[in-house]
Amino acid sequence: MLIIWRFILLTIIFLAALICFPDYPQTAPITVFIMFIISFVAVLVLTFFSSILFLGRSHVFNCIFDLAMILVVGYFLLNIMPQTDGVSPYDKVKNGKYPTESQIKKGLKKLDFTTEGLEEDIKKTSKELNKGIGEIQKVITKEVKN
């Protein structure tokens, strides 16, 4: 279960980097995927050694390990990830150039995640929920009166 959790953490880190910094060349996803594989193998090895030393049973150790993994992998990913302008994402963040909403939308579009129609779906779902809540309120008031 711990390995699955760490796999999910790594996946979130790498997808977030690709989404937040979408100005990368076509070969960047391959570079990021190779780094993902290398970091996952390193995490597997470290998890194996920590379980041999019985450190893996400590929740505090696991939390510290996960935090260190996020920081180290994020640091290396943001330094190594290629960008079309030649400036690494780490340097952009260090200089105060944070991802904007348009960049995030561009990153989602590059990974084939679309947000079109999402607002309409949310409005439609909220209307249906409000109708359901209204019907439940009617039933409850009817039962209370009886």
Image (cartoon, rainbow, N blue to C red):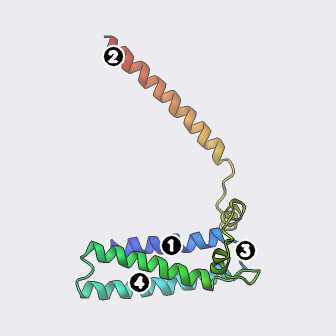
Please identify the quarter of the rendering in which residue 54 is found.
bottom left
- For badge 3, the amino acid type reads Asp
Marks 4 and 1, how far apart in space? 13 Å
Sequence-first disc among 4 and 2: 4
The residue positioned 43% from the left and 87% from the top of the image is: 42
> Which x, y percent locates residue 32?
60, 81
Residue 85 is situated, as x and y percent measured from the top left of the image, at 77, 80
Residue that mark 2 sits on? 143
Instruction: For mark 4, give the secondary structure.
Output: helix
> Which quadrant: the N terminus?
bottom left
Q: Which of these two is toward me, 112 or 88? A: 88
The residue pinned by badge 4 equals 43
Kindly report the distance in space between the C-alpha atoms of the residues bearing marks 3 and 2. 60 Å
Query: Which residue in the structure is indicated by mark 1?
Result: 11
- The residue depicted at 64 percent of the width and 74 percent of the height is 93
Q: What's under tag 4, amino acid-wise?
A: Val
First in residue order: circle 1 vs circle 3: 1
- Give coordinates of residue 16: x percent, y percent: 58, 69
